[in-house]
Amino acid sequence: MKKKSSLTRSILIGLAVALVIIVYAYGFQVTKVNFEETRSEKRLEQLTRIIRALAHPEIIEYDQEEVFVEVPIYLPCPEGDIDYPEPDTSGPYLVLDPYCENAGEFIVVRGENFMPGNRGPINFIPPSGASLTMGSFEVDADGKFEERVQLPKRQPLEDAQIVRAIARQNVGAPYFTSVAGATFDKIIETIFLALLATTFGTIIAIPMSFMAARNLMSDVKSPLMSVSLMILGWLIGMALGFLATRYVRLLNDLLADNTLMMIGGLVLSVFVALLAIRWAVSTEEEEEGPGLGLRAARIMAMVIAALGFILATYLLADLLYLLGDYLTGKLGPFDFIGYFIEQTGAALNIVTPLLAALAGGAVFGGMLSQFGLVLSGLLSEGAAKVVNFLLAAITGAILLAIFGALVEWLYQIGNPVETFIIPAAIGFLLGGLLSLRVGPKDLLPIGSIIYTIMRTLLNAVRAIEPLIYVIIFVVWVGIGPFAGALALALHTIAALAKLYSEQVESISSGPLEAVTATGATRIQTIVYAVVPQIIPPYISFTMYRWDINVRMSTIIGFAGGGGIGFLLQQNIRLLDYRAAAVQMLAIAIVVASMDYISSALRKRFV
């Protein structure tokens, strides 16, 4: 039996080895591995030229003085003797071996009496005056050089033509080349491009990471009635928030013609909003069971506060835009501050409708969700089942109708029956079937559903490289670093949210259970039990992501994303490898420096 077992094991090992060989053999075929190409003289010559160019980055240069030394040559050799002039040995001169030769043949060019260290090209000058480079030289310590060059293939002429050596010598102090200056500007642009992408990506990734953490979301459960009302509340609240910004914007436009009115409106709107909030909160604390009228007044006060803050945001945005526009051109080297203020105002104008919609959705969604919890507990099972059916069917119909509208916008089908009515009917049917399958008092794992959706979204966004995103953003905002920053920010959101969420999932459960046992809300649990444990790794991940974004900005520059990659792409396409070497060196220095700095910061704060 032992012999048979050993034989079986040997056969299995042999089959496994054969399978591995077959896999790698097919891999060689698919990837077209060809080691014979590595021995090609032409390719080796090109590789050597590129490596030598990369080893001589064009960082500094000198002013140069040039000395032209010429000697006649005949192509081909004329009949009879050649009356060849004697060279002037009092200065640098050339000697050819031979002085005449057929086109395309090789000759030896010797230089004498040159300055040691001089270098330059050896050119062939035909009667037309065009300069054809045949080779280059470098003078030794004795003032001599010797180079074997090939004559160009030219039509034969009776008259002598010219071989010219141009001796170049550095004079004066060295200074940075224009390539080095452009590289410095672009590497600074790259650093701040990556900084902005990391900053905005981090701000959005942090709240998303909590929704993508299984240990925080797995225990979030609600009855179907509460879930349906929450979804409807979010949709209603987002729509109302967006509409509110449109009407408030009309009031803002009336004040926009006068700066004093804008300032007065800003102060008044903030004052009214704070006063309304203070009144609403104070009346809530006065008594446990306020009447219906007081509740309505409190809600109205909160609505007024929300409208006041929206108006204040719009007025602040317009004031910032005016202030930035006024300061631009008046601050000299600090003009960027005026530009920053102006763009901050423009950004506020853009994000205010989005923030208002999200705030409205959160308020209405939370209110209706709580109402659903209370209503589900009050109704009998039969009544709850009927209400669940109606709410789930209506919610499903609305969600699939919105999905159909998105499909219509993307594909422009032009048939409302297919893109609106049929999806709404299917949604109604699915929602109704879900309510019949789920018990009227059963709790749905809404947290796990949100977790799955968030994880799927993050994986999808992270799977696409920033190089693809930048192509889209270039169309939207134009070629330049802004498109690169947007592309990196989008990828950073997905990457950091995943890393952050995994860190949240690995925290100690003790503090989480202790805070939850006190009856704390979910936000209080996150603030007091989760955040203290994740601050150090969050800082570490964020700094590491900045490092990654600096390196990735090199690649997105190839697609028009700005930064040093854009300059590197241009020089590689022009085969200017000495200039490309400067950009590669700058990238290496910055990445190494950031690695050292981030290591020091992690040691200090993490």
Image (cartoon, rainbow, N blue to C red):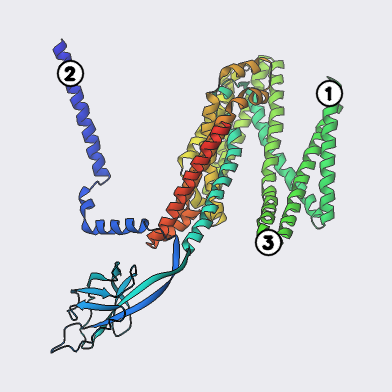
The residue positioned 68% from the left and 35% from the top of the image is: 361
Q: Which residue is mark 3?
A: 332
- In percent of width and height, residue 548 lies at 48, 42
User: What label does residue 285 carry, if any?
Assistant: 1
| Lateral position of residue 538 relative to residue 352, left or right | left
Q: Nearer the viewer, residue 437 or 258?
A: 258
Is label 2 in a helix, a strand or a loop? helix
Relative to 509, residue 328 above or below: below
Determine crowd level at label 2: few under 14, some 14-19, many 20+ residues with C-alpha closer than 10 A.
few
**Mark 2 or mark 1, earlier in chain:** 2
Task: State whether residue 559 appears in this view.
Answer: no
**Mark 1 or mark 3, earlier in chain:** 1
- In percent of width and height, residue 578 lies at 39, 60
Residue 74 occupies which quadrant of the picture? bottom left
User: What label does residue 8 carry, if any?
Assistant: 2
User: What label does residue 450 carry, if any?
Assistant: none
Relative to 80, residue 167 above or below: above
The residue positioned 58% from the left and 38% from the top of the image is: 202
- In percent of width and height, residue 397 lies at 60, 33
Q: Nearer the viewer, residue 500 or 98?
A: 98
Contact between labelled residues 3 and 2, with CB atoms less than 8 Å apart: no
- What's the amino acid at mark 3? Gly
In whole angstroms, how far apart are the C-alphas of marks 2 and 3?
83 Å
The quarter of the rendered structure image containing the N terminus is top left
In whole angstroms, how far apart are the C-alphas of marks 2 and 1?
80 Å
- What's the amino acid at mark 1? Glu
- What's the amino acid at mark 2? Thr
| Lateral position of residue 30 relative to residue 482, left or right | left
Residue 108 occupies which quadrant of the picture? bottom left
